[in-house]
């Protein structure tokens, strides 16, 4: 629905003219995220406080305007795309670290704080914030909470939901609620767990209490090199079977590592079929013992080389390659489509072979870089938007990959969220009764379906009819 002049005037009166964008040229910057879908908002508003958010929601509620919360726009499933038009609430100006409490190992931040800035702020105290998405230099904590973001180092530490100790949120009726008191275990229902990963469909988050973790005494980073992806995939399962849980266990196949090496010169072998980037941390003696065990498992599974970073700089260089993998793809393809499926660790090798079959079927040079330790697959599907049907072909291949993930006991998302990209696959993952329950939670918080409409739940394609709000469904 289009926002009327009255809505724009009310927003400007409440927050000031410099807090509202409505010019078509300005709005074009907010019609997309890091995924492939697009939709224009009718206006963008920039709150600077919880009181501003309350004022915005009162106006939106009065005029029945749908709205979408937005962080940095680095999401990959269309979560910040305004499918129904309406209002984008951008938290870019709510970007303050409000409190650092090292003694109690926590901090309180606003949703627009960049992920990496938390670790930077507490680095001198010997602490860090564990969830580290590849986009951590740009993504914000509010978006991380909405999508329950992960990252390479969440294998041992856990994803976002494991590091949130309190939330202040504003409900669709403009009520401000506080959940959690800063402790890891709160009495009663786990409202923080419910809202983390709800993709902005239930509430807008205005303050976040995060858990800080102390740096370990020793950190060791290893690079295992393989002649086949099967060997690398089997290593992941073997490490799990041996009870070895690294803090990070990442994998890149040959096409991906060659792109990364050409872009970053991180020292990856260009002639390898796959590599595993493995990191362990803890006491010096423990790290040394784990390093030896991991080396033995990797070589037993066919690794031709197991390299151990000898300096801090070498370790950072190896991680630079991994963290900049998505950017490296731009050297060979104008655009690409990233998928986000999950499979059991024992199925990683089989899934890589399935992805290869799908790549040949659709004639797409798919490459892979992913969190192998928890089976979170990220196949990269390049396409050329200038070629008619190229994107649709990539999307069909991506959907087939996710269907395979479901078939082997996995899921359609590990950290990117469902958004509008995967909502129709929800009916293949969950029975109707479960989807009805999800809908009930959504409408309990948001009975008018004004928050992020057209996300998460399938709109029905002959198999299931669940409409968040018929007049807003595209």
Image (cartoon, helix red, strand yellow):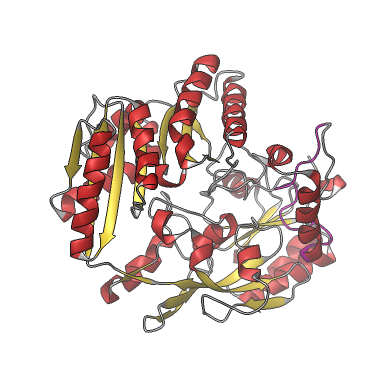
Residue at 52% over, 39% down? 343
Res 159 seen here? yes
In the foreground, 325 or 166: 166
Q: Position of residue 272 (x, y in %)?
A: 26, 27
Q: Residue 234, relative to residue 433: is it above or below?
A: above
In the foreground, 175 or 15: 175
| Magenta stretch in the rendered image | 445-461
Left or right of residue 106, residue 400 in this image? right
Q: For the C terminus, which image quadrant? A: top right
Q: Position of residue 110 (x, y in %)?
A: 52, 71
Q: Position of residue 171 (x, y in %)?
A: 73, 69
Q: Quadrant of residue 443?
A: bottom right
Q: Residue 299, relative to residue 386: is it above or below?
A: below
In the foreground, 452 or 314: 314
Give the residue furthest to the left: 310
Q: Position of residue 331 (x, y in %)?
A: 35, 29
Res 335 seen here? no
Give the total of numbered labels: 0
Main secondary structure of the magenta stretch: loop
Residue at 38% over, 65% down? 117
Q: Quadrant of residue 452?
A: bottom right
Left or right of residue 448, residue 283 in this image? left
């Amino acid at each position: 629905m289009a926002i009327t002049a009255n809505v724009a005037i009310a927003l400007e009166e409440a927050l000031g003219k410099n807090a509202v964008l409505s010019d078509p040229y300005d709005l074009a910057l907010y019609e997309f995220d890091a995924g492939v879908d697009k939709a224009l908002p009718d206006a963008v508003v920039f709150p600077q406080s919880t009181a501003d958010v309350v004022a915005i929601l009162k106006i939106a509620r009065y005029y029945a305007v749908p709205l979408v919360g937005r962080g940095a726009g680095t999401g990959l499933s269309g979560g910040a795309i305004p499918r129904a038009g309406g209002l984008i609430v951008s938290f870019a100006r709510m970007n303050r670290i409000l409190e650092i409490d090292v003694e109690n190992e926590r901090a309180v931040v606003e949703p627009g704080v960049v992920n990496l800035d938390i670790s930077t702020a507490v680095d001198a105290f010997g602490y860090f914030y564990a969830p580290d998405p590849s986009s951590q230099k740009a993504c914000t904590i509010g978006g991380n909470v909405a999508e329950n973001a992960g990252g390479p180092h969440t294998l041992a530490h856990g994803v976002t939901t494991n590091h949130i100790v309190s939330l202040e949120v504003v409900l669709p009726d403009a009520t401000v609620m506080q959940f959690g008191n800063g402790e890891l275990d709160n009495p009663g229902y786990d409202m923080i767990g419910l809202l983390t990963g709800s993709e902005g469909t239930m509430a807008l988050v205005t303050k976040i209490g995060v858990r800080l973790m102390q740096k370990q005494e020793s950190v060791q980073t290893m690079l295992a090199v393989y002649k086949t992806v099967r060997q690398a995939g089997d290593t992941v399962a073997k490490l799990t079977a041996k009870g070895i849980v690294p803090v990070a266990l990442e994998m890149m196949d040959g096409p991906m590592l060659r792109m990364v090496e050409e872009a970053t010169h991180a020292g990856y072998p260009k002639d390898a079929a796959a590599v595993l980037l493995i990191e362990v941390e803890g006491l010096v003696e423990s790290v040394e013992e784990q390093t030896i065990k991991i080396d033995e498992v990797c070589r037993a599974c066919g690794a031709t080389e197991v390299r151990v970073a000898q300096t801090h700089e070498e370790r950072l260089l190896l991680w630079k390659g991994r963290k900049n993998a998505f950017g490296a793809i731009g050297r060979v393809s104008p655009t690409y489509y990233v998928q986000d499926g999950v499979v059991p660790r024992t199925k990683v090798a089989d899934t890589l072979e399935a992805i290869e079959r799908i790549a040949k079927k659709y004639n797409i040079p798919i490459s892979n870089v992913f969190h192998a330790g928890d089976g979170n697959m990220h196949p990269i599907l390049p396409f050329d938007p200038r070629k008619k049907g190229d994107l649709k072909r990539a999307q069909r291949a991506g959907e087939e990959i996710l269907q395979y993930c479901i078939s082997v006991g996995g899921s359609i998302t590990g950290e990117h969220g469902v958004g509008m990209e995967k909502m129709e696959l929800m009916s293949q993952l969950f029975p109707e009764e479960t989807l009805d329950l999800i809908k009930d939670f959504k409408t309990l918080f948001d009975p008018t379906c004004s928050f992020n409409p057209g996300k998460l739940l399938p709109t029905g394609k002959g198999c299931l009819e669940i409409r968040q709000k018929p007049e807003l469904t595209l």
